[in-house]
Image (tube, rainbow, N blue to C red):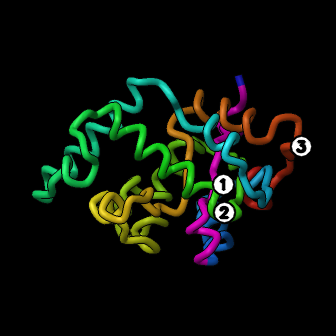
Amino acid sequence: MHHLKEERTFVMVKPDGVRKGLVGEIIKRFEQRDLKIVALEMFHATREEIDNHYPKADAWLQRLGTKTEDTYKRYGLDLVADFGSADHLAIGKEVRTWLLEYMTSAPMVRMVVQGIHAVDMVRKITGATLPYLADMGTIRGDYSADSPAVANAEKRAVYNLIHASETPEEAAHEISYWFGKKTVFSYKRFGVDE
């Protein structure tokens, strides 16, 4: 078992985060909370890489379709008019396609962040997945106001700036997937690791 100060998580600054010039601000937010960046790279993902990053299981796609229907109900929108169907699986597949298009639309930045409870800390700093629900003071709350209702109407993914692993297991998988045999560094930060 690793020392508790060595928990690692995976973070990806998405195309809108890069295009808004927020890479430095995002890194700064993590470092200010005594987390450290132990691997960092700008890259342009292929469709195949992103396709393999997001789940393809019917259960995940159904959940995506259900969330979409919930959004439509909440705002009194017509799901069938926009999607041509109320089938959650079909809707989930379409939304997933928008995700693939979004994530390959521009360069991104991938990183490994390490520190005490890194997975939970990064998600707290990042804020709620849906920017319009994210608290002020979080990355999404301060720099994005997008919502699924707007994104669905425009037939695109929600612009939410950043991806952060949800669990230590997911982090380990994503670090392995996105960094493979590339070096993940080990070093001591002044005042943090001493």
Q: CA distance from mark 3 to mark 2?
A: 20 Å
User: Is residue 54 visible in the rendered structure shown here?
Assistant: yes
Q: Earlier in the sequence, mark 3 or mark 2?
A: 2
Is 10 within the magenta? Answer: yes
Residue 92, compared with residue 147, is above or below; it is above
Residue at the spot of label 1: 35
Question: Mark 2 Cα within 10 Å, few/some/many (few <14, many 20+)?
Answer: some
Determine the secondary structure under disc 1: loop
Q: Do tag 2 and tag 1 residues touch (Cβ < 8 Å)?
A: yes
Q: Earlier in the sequence, mark 1 or mark 3?
A: 1
Residue at horizontal 46 percent and vertical 63 percent from the top: 159
- Residue 50 picture quarter: top right
Residue at the spot of label 3: 183
Residue at horizontal 37 percent and vertical 67 percent from the top: 146
Determine the secondary structure under disc 2: helix
Q: Position of residue 39 (x, y in %)?
A: 80, 50
Question: Mark 1 Cα within 10 Å, few/some/many (few <14, many 20+)?
Answer: many
Residue at the spot of label 2: 31
Q: Do tag 1 and tag 3 residues touch (Cβ < 8 Å)?
A: no
Q: Which residues lie in the magenta part?
A: 2-20
Residue at horizontal 79 percent and vertical 50 percent from the top: 38
- Identified by mark 2, the residue type is Glu
Q: Position of residue 119 (x, y in %)?
A: 56, 42
- Of 37 and 22, which appears nearest the observer? 22
Q: CA distance from mark 2 to mark 1?
A: 5 Å
- Of 107 and 17, which appears nearest the observer? 107
Residue 139, compared with residue 193, is above or below; it is below
- Identified by mark 3, the residue type is Thr
Q: Is residue 106 left or right of residue 151?
A: right
Q: Position of residue 138 (x, y in %)?
A: 44, 65
- Identified by mark 1, the residue type is Leu
Extreme residue toward the left, this view: 76
